[in-house]
Image (cartoon, helix red, strand yellow):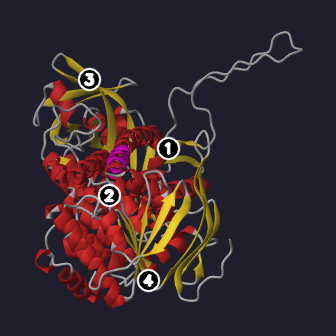
Amino acid sequence: MSEPVLEASVLAARDLKKVFDEQVPVEVLKGITLDFPRGQFASIVGPSGSGKSTLLYILGALDRPTSGSLSIGGRVVDTMTQNQLADLRNEMIGFVFQFHFLLPEFTALENAIMPALIGGTRREDVESRGLELLDRVGLKHKAQQRSTKLSGGEQQRVAIARALINRPALVLCDEPTGNLDTRNSEAVYRLFRELNQENRQTIIVVTHDPDFAGRTDRTVRLVDGLVDQDQLNEVPPGG
Amino acid sequence: MKGLRFTLFVALRHIRMRVRSTLLILLGVSLGVFVMVVMQSMMFGFQAEFMRILLTTTPSILVKGRERGTISEGRIYTSRPGTLYDQTRLKPIEKEEGIRAYRTLSREIEAIPGVQAVAPIVQGRAILRYGTRDRGANVIGVDAPDYDRVVEFRSKVIGDVDELIRRRDGVILGVFLAEELGAVPGTRIRMIGVEGQEADLRIVALFRSGITAIDKTYAFVNLPMGQSILDYPTAATGIAVKVSDPDRATPIARRVEFVTGLESQSWQEINAVFFGIMRQQNVITFGAVAMTILVAGFGVANGLVTVVLEKRRDIGILRSLGVTARGVAAIFTVEGIIIGILGAIVGVALGAVWVDIMDDLPIGGRGGLSTSDTFLMLREPAVYIRSIVFALIVSTAASLAPALRAAKYDPVEIIRTAK
């Protein structure tokens, strides 16, 4: 099972297991070994309860595996403290969740630059980049609007801008289009694809949408806590 | 601190945007601080005024006409085991001897460091009779100019003090004493001493100190008249002493005792019962105020718990974005502290306004310790500072529990279950 860690891999998971301590312990992940090279746009699919989201949270250092080893950007995270993990998330990882999860008291721009502020950057030093990113997701004109005033699709685009503000090596998305209509889903897909091509960021998307998954570079299929299928896709030029 | 700017950014925004919960918490703190300011101002204001009057009306030290350590009253019977009958009896001394050498002793006392002025006095009980009314009085025979150097006598007299010097039969009555007798300045009244001496006196002026007990009982006559009525033809019953630093009165009293051999009491010792009452009052006041602040503290805690519950989702997001658990706790603690500060400012402002209003507010009727018609409010900064500091300590302590609760939230759990 222990394959050599690829030199170029941004994310290396070795035999990850996750057991939830319910009354009867439930083993959600039963030994996942995966490597994601830099610049890969990958998708994780599988039926409900297959452990997709759990895997994503562990890959994003938001949750810890029960056993197994994980390194992000060449750094082994297994022995890191909670505070180190928080810093790592802040610097290396951008999350996009199904529910856009913006902070309601803040404007679109403030939400977008939030990770930079958490990292200690001054507001004035990051605002122009925040505006650039909002422009990139087509929302520059709504930068000063309260996040609650935005539509669902717009909020998700702000969340994507937020995930990118710290130039993370890794962008992890949990059902980013799960709540969006076809038109907005398509926009989000295009955005990821473009960002992936421009910045060579590794993007991993958990999705139920087979069409979306089929247009990523690689699809990992989880069944019952194990990798059932791991295949590279033929992506038509231009996504 | 790297995270402080971010912490303040989020905390201030929460405070500003969540007006309702902010106001609710703020109101609790303000009310607590308000009550604390007003209660303290009222309590200490009254006490400070009472002390001021006491210090300007009664001497800092009173030297008495008896030797230190003598028993002046009471009976002692003892029967020792082994004896059939053995009784020791100390006859109560009916009347103190008085200080014959009061002029010499006065000079000696005046020479003691810290003593500013001395005045021999003769003091005792007498009955005042006007028409058919009799009233008991505390008669004090004084040499007015001397006595005025020991207490602020002249300023408390309504009328002409010098009449007391000019006429041998002049008397100055406490305002309430005169009122009870139904006598006004100019009337003649009869004074009867306990030894039977009598004199017809003329009320030349009234005396108002502001302390009810004094204004209801004191009657001033000049020294020779006092000596005659109280039956101390050649003696004084005491020497009133003023010291330059009232706080040092007790040690100086001891020094006076040492020099003169006569029992001396400082104003603190004389009024020990009053001060005991005041101390108890303070304890009770602080108990009541502490309750208010405690309730305010619960308000802060309760308000913040609600905020934390409502912000559960946001806490999950912040954690996923890289805020540490401690960072989350910091945000809510800072929120509590800032609202505490705002609440304290509002409370102090309201308190100051109310203290101003109360200062002019009539206290229904007299009859308490003080004769003031209005509340005596203290406006010292210490009152406000103490309230603010207390509010800050309480609101900080009160925000810790909700903040720690926020820190314990599991971000994965939140994100997994949020809709």
Chain holding disc 4: A
Instruction: Find numbered disc 4 in the image and state the secondary structure of the residue it sits on.
Output: loop
Residue A169's label in the rendered image is: 4
Q: Mark 1 points at which residue?
A: B64
Instruction: Find numbered disc 3 in the image and state the secondary structure of the residue it sits on.
Output: strand
Q: Residues within 10 Å of mark 4 (few under 14, many from 20)?
A: many
Q: Can residue A90 be seen in this view?
A: yes
Gap between marks 1 and 4 measured at Cα: 93 Å
User: Which three-letter amino acid code belongs to the residue tagged 1?
Assistant: Lys
Gap between marks 2 and 4 measured at Cα: 42 Å
Query: What percent of the width, then of the height, locates residue B7?
Result: 36, 70
Q: Mark 2 points at which residue?
A: B340
Chain holding disc 2: B
Near-viewer residue (A136 or B408): A136
User: Which three-letter amino acid code belongs to the residue tagged 3?
Assistant: Arg
Chain holding disc 1: B
Marks 3/2 in contact by CB < 8 Å: the verdict is: no
Gap between marks 4 and 3 measured at Cα: 99 Å
Query: What percent of the width, then of the height, locates residue B387?
Result: 34, 55
